[in-house]
Image: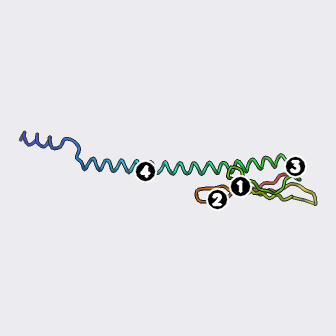
Amino acid sequence: MNRQSAARRRGRRGVTMIELLVALAIISIGVFGLAGGATLVTRLTGGGTIQTRAAMVANAHIEQWRSMTCSSVSSGQDTVRSVISQWTATSVTSAGSRRGTSISLTVQYPTTKGMRSQVYNTILPC
């Protein structure tokens, strides 16, 4: 009986080849999942960067217009760092006198799925 139990103990030592392959497959799936997640995070971060750039360009335009007089603001367009800005300025009148300027600013910026646009509206008092 001692010989049989000793033989069983000797046969149970170590890890079998199938156990190693299963463990390797599980670890590989986890590593590929992490790599896919890292790719997604990198792409989303890049998208946030261009959206932030577009918002900063729009903010710069609006601040520039606020420093100007109502009569000097006019419609136009420009491109800054691949962000296309187009704006229209219309006067706001009440009782025959000019009260302000209404500005509609559209910024267009590139994404991985094509161009995306955002519209900003503001009124500058005179």
User: How many residues crowd around disc 1 within 10 Å: few (fewer than 14), some, or many (20 or more)?
Assistant: some
Give the percent coordinates (x, y) of residue 27.
36, 47
Marks 4/3 in contact by CB < 8 Å: the verdict is no
SS at badge 2: strand
Mark 1: which secondary structure?
A: strand
Q: Residue at x 50, y 50 (%)?
A: 39
Q: CA gap, disc 4 to disc 1?
A: 37 Å
Quote the CA–CA distance across marks 4 and 2.
Answer: 30 Å
Q: How many marks?
A: 4
Relative to residue 68, is residue 115 drawn left or right?
left
Q: Which mark is residue 69?
A: 3
User: Which residue type does callout 3 highlight?
Assistant: Thr
Q: On the image, numbered disc 1 is attached to which residue?
A: 84
Q: Amino acid at mark 2?
A: Met
Q: Residues within 10 Å of mark 2 (few under 14, many from 20)?
A: few
Q: Position of residue 86 (x, y in %)?
A: 75, 57
In three-dimensional space, the C-alpha distance between marks 1 and 3, rounded to whole angstroms, equals 24 Å
